[in-house]
Image (tube, rainbow, N blue to C red):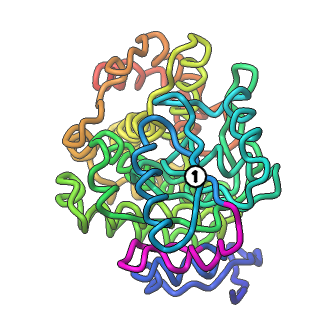
């Protein structure tokens, strides 16, 4: 991997040189990060089989994904390999202390753990494998989130959601037949996580221009190309066609790589994610099941897009207003984003998730405090703009 340095506002920044053409070669791009991204072939994932030679394999699934784990085990047996299933006895497990302990206990004696699933199962494999000194991978069963290649795992401990160090997966195994058959709302969650990049990349650029925050062009360009490819294939994504789902999955994988290049989550997370995190804590306080990450992020994306688009109509003058207006111009309309999410079965109103109106208002006034990161939400609060905006945003999206 070739390191290069470039200048941002007079500061030297270390980054990695990855030609944008690598987007079309997700396998080659992944190799630069030490990850095997492999599509199913007639030879049944030969690279994965070679990389795990001599290791006792555990396939981690839940009640929903066990059918895919069993089929995968059968495929391995056809190639003279054996794998053992560990099925969490729940349809929607959560990554809490109890489930982590369940997986960790069963991982003893294994040399590799392959998550057969998406978000939670992937996080469990990354976290428990990390602490057991065992490599992990994932057979993705839905293009539903962008944490496949991250080196951290969001967990629930003592009723609070925290992010713990984990490990990056060694292998990402992709079967488009499985991904295209995933429930529509899971594909919609993935689309919500990718549409969010319109907002978070704009948040980052605005902070760079107004505050001098370091800005990594390499990470932005890579993420932007992936985002644009998804937009080009949006009709296929809505139909859960192979080309569209493939573009979505690539973008979700690349999101993790963009964060590695940037050295932080700026290429993938902005105000829309802060809104989602705020709501997650509310669901936890109420002891209720947390909706899919990308579903909540999609709602936050609608709010962020509207906040950007309405800046030009704010009569008040404030520092950075013209910059914010200029950055908002190329953004898609929130109406377009809402139509995409709705076509995939995702909610476009906060009330659809059982969120109280007062909670949404509280979110609008407090979610920017979750992280010390300048976003469009921070801009509104810095200049007292939320007082006039809140009722409009609630009327549109509650």
Instruction: Evaluate whether residue 285 shows in this view.
Output: yes
Question: Which residue in the structure is indicated by mark 1?
Answer: 59
Asked whether 216 or 291 is in front, the reply is 291
Q: Residue at x 35, y 38 (%)?
A: 302
170 horizontally vs 234: left or right: right
Image x and y of residue 26, in percent: 46, 77
Image quarter where the C terminus lies is: top left
Q: Is residue 184 above or below residue 236?
A: above
Question: Is residue 100 found inside the magenta-colored segment of the image?
Answer: no
Q: Residue at x 27, y 55 (%)?
A: 180
Quadrant assignment, res 344: top left
201 horizontally vs 187: left or right: right
Asked whether 319 or 190 is in front, the reply is 190
Q: Residue at x 32, y 63 (%)?
A: 176
Image quarter where the N terminus lies is: bottom right
155 horizontally vs 140: left or right: right
Image x and y of residue 177, in percent: 29, 61
Image x and y of residue 387, in percent: 48, 20
Image x and y of residue 208, in percent: 62, 60
Highlighted magenta segment, given as a residue range: 36-56
Instruction: Evaluate whether residue 212 shows in this view.
Output: no
Question: Considering the numbered disc 1 on the image, is that residue within a helix, a strand or a loop?
Answer: strand
Q: Is residue 380 above or below residue 42?
A: above
Quadrant assignment, res 111: bottom right
Quadrant assignment, res 237: bottom left
Count of picture labels: 1
Question: Is residue 50 found inside the magenta-colored segment of the image?
Answer: yes
Judge the density around disc 1: few (<14), some (14-19), many (≥20) Cα neighbours within 10 Å. Answer: many
Q: Residue at x 64, y 59 (%)?
A: 57
């Amino acid at each position: 991997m070739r390191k290069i340095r470039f200048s941002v506002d007079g500061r030297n920044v270390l980054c990695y040189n990855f030609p944008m053409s690598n987007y079309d070669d997700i396998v080659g791009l992944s190799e630069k990060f030490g990850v095997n991204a492999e599509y199913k072939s007639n030879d049944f994932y030969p690279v994965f089989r070679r990389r795990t030679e001599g290791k006792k394999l555990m396939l981690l699934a839940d009640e929903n994904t066990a059918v895919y784990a069993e089929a995968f085990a059968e495929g391995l047996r056809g190639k003279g390999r054996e794998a053992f299933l560990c099925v969490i006895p729940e349809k929607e497990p959560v990554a809490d202390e109890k489930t982590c302990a369940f997986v960790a206990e069963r991982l003893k004696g294994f040399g590799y753990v392959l998550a057969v699933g998406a978000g939670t199962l992937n996080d469990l494999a990354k976290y428990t494998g990390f602490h057991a000194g065992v490599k992990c991978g994932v057979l993705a069963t839905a293009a539903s989130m962008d944490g496949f290649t991250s080196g951290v795992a969001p967990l629930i401990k003592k009723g609070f959601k925290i992010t713990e160090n984990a490990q990056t997966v060694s292998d990402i195994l992709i079967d488009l037949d499985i991904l295209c058959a995933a429930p529509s709302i899971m594909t919609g969650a993935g689309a919500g996580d990718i549409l969010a990049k319109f907002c978070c990349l704009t948040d980052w650029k605005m902070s760079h221009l107004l505050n001098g925050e370091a800005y990594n062009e390499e990470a932005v360009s890579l993420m932007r190309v992936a985002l644009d490819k998804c937009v080009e294939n949006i009709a296929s994504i809505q139909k859960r066609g192979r080309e569209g789902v493939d573009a979505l999955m690539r973008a979700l994988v690349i999101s993790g790589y963009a964060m590695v290049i940037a050295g932080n989550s700026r290429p993938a997370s902005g105000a829309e994610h802060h809104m989602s995190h705020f709501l997650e804590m509310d669901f936890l306080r109420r002891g209720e099941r947390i909706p899919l990450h990308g579903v909540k992020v999609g709602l936050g994306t609608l709010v962020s897009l509207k906040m950007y688009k309405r800046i030009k109509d704010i009569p008040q003058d404030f520092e950075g207003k013209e910059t914010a207006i200029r950055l908002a111009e190329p953004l898609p309309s929130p109406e377009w984003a809402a139509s995409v999410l709705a076509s995939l079965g995702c909610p476009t109103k906060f009330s659809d998730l059982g969120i109280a109106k007062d909670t949404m208002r509280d979110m609008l006034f407090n979610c920017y405090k979750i992280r010390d990161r300048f976003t469009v939400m921070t801009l509104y609060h810095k200049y007292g703009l939320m007082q006039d905006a809140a009722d409009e945003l609630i009327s549109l999206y509650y």
